């Protein structure tokens, strides 16, 4: 049986940077607080916790004083920065530059649109850390439309709209939403060519992996896709594998592998999300080889 690990899978540069920063801090100080899971992968989180990383939620953060805290690649809303100032917390900011750029763009758009009673709409998962950071740029006034078209009816289609996407969303679904918004605007006699601005803000680290994974999935008899269950781009990339190879399995750890999956299989492909560590995919390859 041939086993191949996809070389294009594994951490994106935003996550690589956040982990590098965390490890440097831990080496220097032995302990570091982090606001939320540093990466949507429990195995990697456990590894860093063993080195001294302490994961806290936003409620814990409000009661934290005089210490150092890491902001992960997802970024944070302005409120987090003001609480840190009040509580004398030194922020180690590992927000991904791509996310920071998007936050700034949204902030600017919101300020400009306010003059014309326009709306900022974000295609993303409500409550997701990155989305909270993005809506925070608009005083939480942005309308978040999910993949199930949640909140779509909150948009006033007769008024100007600027549309953004969470960086890890599904590209095809975003294009469908753009089309739908244009149709609804036309129904309200609002010209989308003039009143709709679209920012194609899905990160290249996610969208470029789609076509590559589609080919990888087709080239193998069985795909073992490794990702944390909470990862948005994990779900997106797994769907691509599954569409191109129905014999695709989603697992988070080697214990979820089943012997029966490998019957009559000649070529196994192991791949994962932007939050999947390479060491975990290698560990899974070793386990499969032992069958
Ligand atoms: S997926 Fe893109 S935007 Fe998100 S953390 Fe990674 S590099 Fe940054």
Image (cartoon, rainbow, N blue to C red):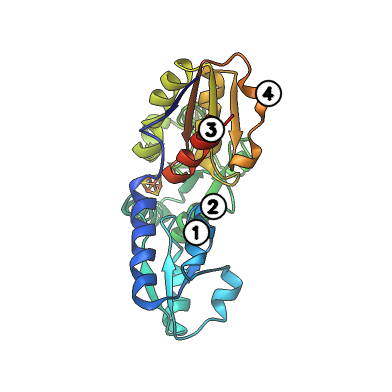
Residue 199 seen anywhere in this rendered image of the structure: no
CA separation in Å, label 4 and label 3 = 16 Å
Q: Is residue 243 above or below residue 56?
A: above
Q: Is residue 93 above or below residue 106?
A: below
Instruction: Report the residue marked by disc 4.
Output: 260
Residue 127 vs residue 156, the one in the foreground = 127
Q: Earlier in the sequence, mark 1 or mark 4?
A: 1
* Residue displayed at 38% across by 73% down: 91
* Total marks placed: 4
CA separation in Å, label 1 and label 4 = 30 Å
Instruction: Report the residue marked by disc 3.
Output: 225
Residue 184 vs residue 115, the one in the foreground = 184
Instruction: Report the residue marked by disc 2.
Output: 43
* Residue displayed at 33% across by 48% down: 13
Q: Position of residue 64 (x, y in %)?
A: 53, 81
Q: Which numbered disc, 1 or 3, marks the residue closer to the eye? A: 1
SS for dot 4: helix
**Label 4 within 8 A of ligand 1 by Cβ:** no
Q: Which numbered disc, 2 or 4, marks the residue closer to the eye? A: 4
Rendered image: mark on residue 47: 1
Q: Position of residue 192 (x, y in %)?
A: 42, 31
CA separation in Å, label 2 and label 1 = 6 Å
Rendered image: mark on residue 97: none
Q: Is residue 275 above or below residue 110?
A: above
Tell whether 148 sits left or right of 27. right
Quadrant housing the C terminus: top right
């Amino acid at each position: 049986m041939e086993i191949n690990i996809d070389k294009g899978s594994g951490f994106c540069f935003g996550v690589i940077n956040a982990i590098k920063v965390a490890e440097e801090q831990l080496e220097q100080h032995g302990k570091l607080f982090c606001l939320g899971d540093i990466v949507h992968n429990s195995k990697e989180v456990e590894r860093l916790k063993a080195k001294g990383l302490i994961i806290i939620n936003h409620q814990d953060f409000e009661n934290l004083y005089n210490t150092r805290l890491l902001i992960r690649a997802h970024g944070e809303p302005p409120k987090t920065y003001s609480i840190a100032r009040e509580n004398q917390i030194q922020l180690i900011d590992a927000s991904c530059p791509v996310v920071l750029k998007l936050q700034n763009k949204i902030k600017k758009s919101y300020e400009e649109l306010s003059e014309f009673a326009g709306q900022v709409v974000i295609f993303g998962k409500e409550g997701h850390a990155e989305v909270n950071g993005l809506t925070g740029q608009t005083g939480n006034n942005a309308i978040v439309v999910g993949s199930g078209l949640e909140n779509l009816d909150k948009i006033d289609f007769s008024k100007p709209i600027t549309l953004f996407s969470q960086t890890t969303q599904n590209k095809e679904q975003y294009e469908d939403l753009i089309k739908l918004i244009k149709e609804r605007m036309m129904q309200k006699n609002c010209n989308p060519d003039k009143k709709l601005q679209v920012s194609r803000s899905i990160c290249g680290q996610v969208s470029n992996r789609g076509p590559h994974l589609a080919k990888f999935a087709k080239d193998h008899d069985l795909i073992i896709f490794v990702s944390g269950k909470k990862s948005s781009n994990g779900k997106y990339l797994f769907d691509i594998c599954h569409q191109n190879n129905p014999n695709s399995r989603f697992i988070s750890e080697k214990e979820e592998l089943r012997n029966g999956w490998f019957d009559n299989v000649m070529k196994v492909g192991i791949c994962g999300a932007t939050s999947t560590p390479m060491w975990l995919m290698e560990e899974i390859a070793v386990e499969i080889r032992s069958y």
